[in-house]
Image (cartoon, rainbow, N blue to C red):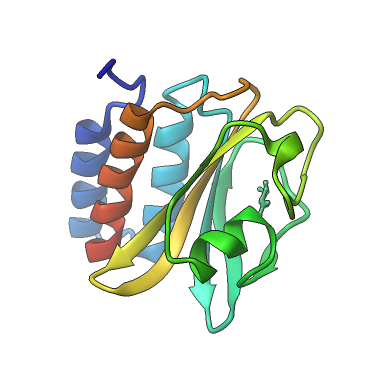
Amino acid sequence: MAESVLNSAPIVRALHSAFTRDSGRRGLLELAARRIREAGAPFTSVYLYMLHGSELALEAFDGRETEHTRIPVGVGLCGRAVAEARDINEPDVTAAPGYLACNLDTRSELIVLIRLGETILGQIDVDSDVPAGFTSADEAALKEVADALAVLL
Ligand code: SME
């Protein structure tokens, strides 16, 4: 498997270090968003949506702004990932039923759930301007970051 441009180990270390400095939930989420986006393409824009009851709320992001700051479970790709309790790697957003667009440049999207055991806490949602941008190595690397967040938040 080809390596991901996302090197998760230093990001996980940075998150642990921020945790010991009492960065708080917002600080950890903003750090994760910034460091993931720093990997560069295909990681164009990064959104941290956290689950509040039956709604996802955007708590941090890095990259393009989005109007979708609250997304009900079951709506859009983000809400579907939660409803179906699975990660989603969508190679072509223009062909994805129910896709919620926040700009016209995004071509593919990767959503990895932040879960603690069976409990879904939220998700890392990454938009890419690259069609079919994300490999299984990208998914695995993003999951390492999601798993670190799950225990630190
Ligand atoms: N595309 C997502 C909405 C989130 S914005 O892209 C940041 C969806 O279909 O749920």
Residue 31, above or below 77: above
- In the image, residue 53 above or below residue 21: below
Q: Residue 89's spot in the image, x, y percent?
A: 50, 40
Outermost residue toward the bottom in this view: 53
The residue positioned 36% from the left and 60% from the top of the image is 114
Instruction: Point out residue 143 in the picture as x, y percentages from the top left corner.
Output: 31, 45
Q: Position of residue 9 (x, y in %)?
A: 19, 34
Residue 101 left/right relative to 131:
right
- Where's the N terminus, which quadrant? top left
Residue 75: quadrant of the picture: bottom right
Q: Quadrant of the C terminus?
A: bottom left
Q: Is residue 66 left or right of residue 79?
A: right
Say which residue appears at 58% left-offset and 62% top-offset.
80
Estimate the x, y position of residue 3 in percent, counting from the top left.
27, 18
| Farthest-out residue, top | 2
The relative height of residue 56 versus residue 134 in the rendered view (above or below) is: below
In the image, residue 17 above or below residue 119: above
Q: Quadrant of residue 140?
A: top left
Residue drawn at x 79%, y 37% as measured from the top left: 103
Task: State the residue in front, 61 or 3.
Answer: 3
Q: Nearer the viewer, residue 99 or 40?
A: 99
Residue in the foreground of this view, choosing between 117 and 12? 117
Q: Is residue 62 left or right of residue 105?
A: left
Q: How many marks?
A: 0
Residue drawn where x is 81% and y is 32% of the image: 104
